[in-house]
Image (cartoon, grey):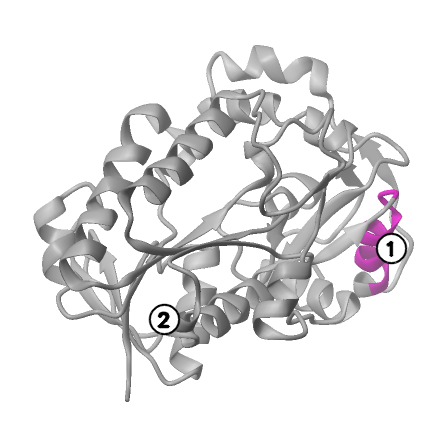
């Protein structure tokens, strides 16, 4: 029997890729948008994730709600993310549906969590991480059916905001020097968005075979010293690339005037300490994790970004 999902954030990175994967799996997909849209095989509905009535109307008779929406540019993050989530929880409860949330590594302290499993204690050391913990706690205590899929830093052909497209390279320009935020030799977890979307689709296909509340970790691409990603960029553009370190010392000053930069400063420890995701539970649930070879994933991403 065909299933229906509402994707909040379907025009963004993880939401868009999850919507496309669900459609490929035979789902009917609705998207909530503040301005008229067409295409992508999505049944677009007009509304705002902050408007509970609009979310409830768009979610009528759905089997799943993918909550992949965030305030643009981190503006008013503290004020908006929890009310938006509460609207999705209400819509899930009203339809006996399942909530799907993209999780982050920010729930953990990178200084003490080199490897994280789904049941690892969450001790964030950033404001954003603390809010993320509250979001997951709100879902768990709501008693609705839910699945959280945690992954590393996203990259892909339609990334929304990402470290690759907003830091390492400049969209629309050939790759020159690559700005790297990591400390030399420190490992980092990356996640190719089409693979994340496919993983969400496989999980949601399982329906009530999943636990009532489930957390899974997506292993993705593990770059153990920072050279895998820069090597993949060089291979994709067909020439060696030089790197330069992100000027972290300047970001607090820029952050006084730029909310996005202010949030980026908090993320520095995640580039100076390794945080690897243990995906054993995910593999047990769906079989082998979807994995596009890194050279293909990076070439596809850079081409789409206009960085050939």
Residue 260 against residue 51 in the figure, above or below: above
- The local secondary structure at tag 2 comes to helix
Q: Residue at x 60, y 58 (%)?
A: 305
| Residue 231's disc number | 1
Label 1 Cα neighbours within 10 Å, binned few <14 / some 14-19 / many ≥20: some
Q: Main SS of the magenta segment?
A: helix
Percent of width and height locating residue 129: 51, 29
Is 186 left, or right, of 254 in this rendering? right
Q: Position of residue 1 (x, y in %)?
A: 28, 89
The answer to which of marks 2 and 1 sits earlier in the sequence is: 2
- Whether the residues at callouts 2 and 1 have beta carbons within 8 Å, the answer is no
- Which numbered disc covers residue 103? none
* Circle 2 residue: 208
Label 2: few (<14), some or many (≥20) within 10 Å? few
Q: Is residue 65 magenta?
A: no
Q: Residue at x 69, y 70 (%)?
A: 291
Q: Is residue 226 magenta?
A: yes
Q: What residue occupies the far bottom of the structure in this picture?
A: 1
Vertical placement of residue 59 versus 292, above or below: above
Q: Is residue 161 visible?
A: yes
Front label number (2 vs 1): 2
Of 258 and 96, nearer the camera is 96
* Magenta part of the chain: 225-235
Q: Quadrant of the C terminus?
A: bottom right
Q: In x, y percent, where is residue 204?
A: 41, 70
Q: Left or right of 206: which side holds 123?
A: right
The correct choice, above or below, for 130 with respect to 150 in the image is above
Q: Residue at x 62, y 57 (%)?
A: 218
Give percent across and percent down for residue 15.
Answer: 41, 59
Q: In the image shown, does 308 or 296 lie closer to the viewer? A: 296
């Amino acid at each position: 029997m065909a299933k229906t999902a509402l994707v909040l954030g379907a025009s963004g990175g993880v939401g868009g890729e999850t919507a496309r994967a669900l459609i490929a799996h035979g789902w009917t997909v609705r998207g909530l948008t503040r301005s008229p849209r067409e295409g992508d095989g999505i049944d677009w509905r007009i509304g705002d994730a902050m408007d509970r009535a609009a979310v409830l109307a768009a979610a009528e008779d759905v089997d799943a709600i993918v909550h992949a929406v965030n305030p643009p540019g981190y503006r008013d993050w503290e004020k908006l993310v929890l009310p938006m989530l509460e609207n999705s929880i209400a819509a899930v409860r009203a339809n006996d549906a399942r909530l799907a949330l993209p999780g982050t590594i920010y729930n953990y302290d990178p200084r003490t969590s080199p490897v994280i499993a789904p049941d690892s204690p969450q001790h964030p050391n950033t404001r954003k991480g603390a809010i993320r913990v509250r979001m997951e706690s709100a879902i768990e205590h709501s008693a609705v059916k839910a699945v959280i899929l945690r992954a590393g830093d996203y990259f892909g052909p339609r990334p929304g905001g990402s470290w690759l497209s907003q830091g390492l390279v400049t969209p629309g320009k050939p790759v020159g020097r690559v700005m790297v935020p990591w400390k030399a030799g420190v490992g980092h977890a990356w996640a190719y968005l089409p693979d994340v979307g496919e993983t969400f689709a496989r999980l949601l296909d399982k329906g009530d075979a999943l636990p009532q509340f489930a957390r899974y970790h997506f292993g993705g691409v593990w770059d153990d010293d920072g050279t895998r990603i820069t090597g993949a960029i060089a291979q994709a553009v067909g020439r060696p690339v030089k790197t330069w370190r992100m000027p972290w010392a300047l970001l607090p000053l820029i952050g006084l005037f730029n909310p996005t930069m202010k949030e980026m400063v908090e993320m520095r420890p995640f580039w100076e300490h390794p945080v690897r995701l243990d995906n054993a539970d995910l593999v047990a649930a769906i079989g082998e994790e979807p994995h596009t070879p890194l050279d293909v994933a990076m070439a596809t991403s850079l081409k789409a970004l206009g960085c050939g």
